[in-house]
Structures are given as structure tokens and as C-alpha cells.
Image: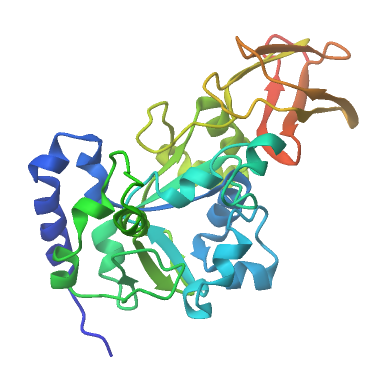
Amino acid sequence: MAPAFETSTFRAILNQLAQEDWVKDTERRWWPQFAFHYTDIRNAVSILQQGRLLSRLQVERDGKIAVSSGSVEVLAGTDWGIKDCVRLYFRPKTPTQFYAEGVHSQKTLAVSKFPDAHCPAPVFFLFDLPDVLALPESRFSDRTLAGREYTLLKSPQDLSNLPWQEIYHTEWIDWNDPLTAREIIAHRNAEIIVPGALDLSALKFIYCRSEAEKDTLLHLLPPTIKSQYRDKIFASSRNELYFRRRTFVERAMLINSHVYLRFSADTEARGPFNLKIEIESAGQKFIHEKKSFLFPPFDYVFPLDATFYSYQMSVMLDDSLVYANQFIDSSSPF
């Protein structure tokens, strides 16, 4: 049996890391507090309903993975033992996230290094890192676990000796030195693993990329689960968690006759998309569907087929759910 280590021991090491000059005065200042896991919003709903994160193999066996954002090529080179673990990162904005985040157009998928790695509406789960590291079965690495060239580590001394400046690297990578560049990328993807499943007792925050995506997550959650986690769910408009390079819904406003949507202005993926808006009211469904490019100012107004006092709606770009919510007219006498 592996020796047990106290949470406080890991916390002291990470607090010291957070006080390093190259960490404390940068966007990295809060990273040492957390273990990061991101997944598509539809998977996030399932995780919160189950009350735990499951390994990829487990969710595939159970048929509970709504959106798979992993590259088939990368997963094929990953040990089965690793795929049977919950996997978290020491940081956000990993190279893996870079390729997967946001709604791709067919054009951007065609030029992507990993065209099947696609996480349209990512949600971040932030866990207390010392608590996760202190779990008896947890392990960590100094690099990605997607290949074979890794060592699984456990002790506080191992944690202290990690190449933190490479793991937390945020600067431009010079590909004139490909060996160094590949090492930096491998370290940026350093991971923490927990075999089988990880409950949510160490979960501190849930971050969405925009207010619209936060509203979507809350809408998709059953009432009891929504009540349980509402105080932990936030929207971040800053770039410290997300790259924001591809399409997503930033804002939405629903009224009884129109739907207003604002898509991300900085997107590099402007379409064409198959845009589908589905409205459901009083047992009837109304569908607006068309091929669409996104153009500045990225604000769109969609008139409804009638005036509704209440309705539920969803927005799809191709096969990706990008927004869902409910409208209830508070002025209605009914």
C-alpha cells in the first residue's frame, strides 16, 4: 500500500509555489490552488447528476458520454490503465484544450492538427488540488499521459521537484528548437489521475465561458441539482481559463416575440454552420433552420412564429448545442 500524505503537506508546497515571483504577479497566481478538469456542457450536466467524475472507459461502458472531445489518434496511444482513470490538469489552457475548445467550422476542422478533438461548450471543474493529491490512490506526472514516456509520482517531494516553469509555461514557443518545443508542450499537459472515479467533495468552483453558457448549464440541470451547485457556478469573461478562439454564444436575451443572440466576436470559425433554433411551447415545436455564416457585429435577432408567454428553446450549430434556456413572461396573467 502506498504511504499516506497529509493534505497540509501538499498545501504548504503549493502555497510556496504561489509566492514565487514568476507566479504571483501573473495570471498563474491562483493555479496552484486547483486541479482542473474541463468537459463539454452536456457531459457536465451528467457529472453533476451522478455526483462524480468517471474515467473515460467507465463512461464509455455506461454509455454516458454525450460529447467526446478526445482525439482518436491520441487516445489510441494512451495506456488502458490511464484511460481507466479520471484525468485532471495542473493548469487551464493546455495544448489539448487549444485544439478542442469551441465550435469549429468545417474549415477550421480541416486544418486542425486533431480534427476529431472537439469540445464545443467547455465547462471547467476546479477541485482543491491538495485534497486531490492527498487521496490514497491519486498520482501525478510531469508531462502528458497520452504517450508512454511518463512516470507516475506521488510524494510531496515529487510534487516539489516538478518542472513548474515548464508546466506553467505561457510564453510563445519557438519551433526553431523542436525538441525543446515538444518538451514544453508535454509538460504543459502534466496530469493528475485518480483511478475509476472521483467524487465531488473537493469541487470548489464550476466555470462557464460566458453568461449565456452559464444560463445553459443551469437550465439543463434538474432543480435539486441546480439548487445544490448554483452557488459554485460562475461565468468568466476573462481569458485565464479559456482561449476563446472559436465560436460560442456570449449573450442571449429571450422575449415573447424574439430571440437575441450575440456570438463571440473574436471567433476564427465563422462558418458556414447549420444554425438550428428549436422553440417548444404548450406541446408544440417550432424549428428555424438555415445555413449561416457569422459576420460582425455578431448580433442576431430571430423573430418567433408567434407571441409566447412561455417557451423553452435551444440553439445548435451543426451538431453542437451552444445555448438553451427557458422564457417565462412575468407580466402574463396566466
Q: Is residue 89 visible?
A: yes
Is 186 displayed left or right of 259 in the figure? left
Side of 109 where 312 appears, left or right: right
Residue beneath the point at 49% across and 62% down: 52
Residue 324 x, y percent position in the rendering? 68, 32
- Residue 212 place in picture, x, y as percent: 57, 26
Residue 316: image quadrant is top right
Residue 105 in sight in this render: no
Q: Is residue 321 above or below residue 130?
A: above
Q: Nearer the viewer, residue 297 or 285?
A: 297
- In-front residue for pair 235/146: 146
> 126 or 81, which is in the foreground?
81
Q: Taking 148 as reference, is 169 above or below it?
A: above
- Applied colour scheme: rainbow
| Drawn side of residue 206 relative to residue 270, left or right | left
In the picture, which quadrant includes the N terminus? bottom left
Residue at 38% across / 27% down in the picture?
A: 238
Q: How many marks?
A: 0
Quarter of the picture containing the C terminus is top right
Q: Quadrant of residue 60?
A: bottom right
- State the residue at coordinates (50%, 62%): 53
Q: Spot the residue most to the bottom.
A: 1
Q: Residue 332, located in which quarter of the rendered image?
A: top right
Q: Residue at left 44%, top 35%? A: 243
Q: Extreme front residue here? A: 176
- Along the horizontal axis of the image, is 32 left or right of 255? left
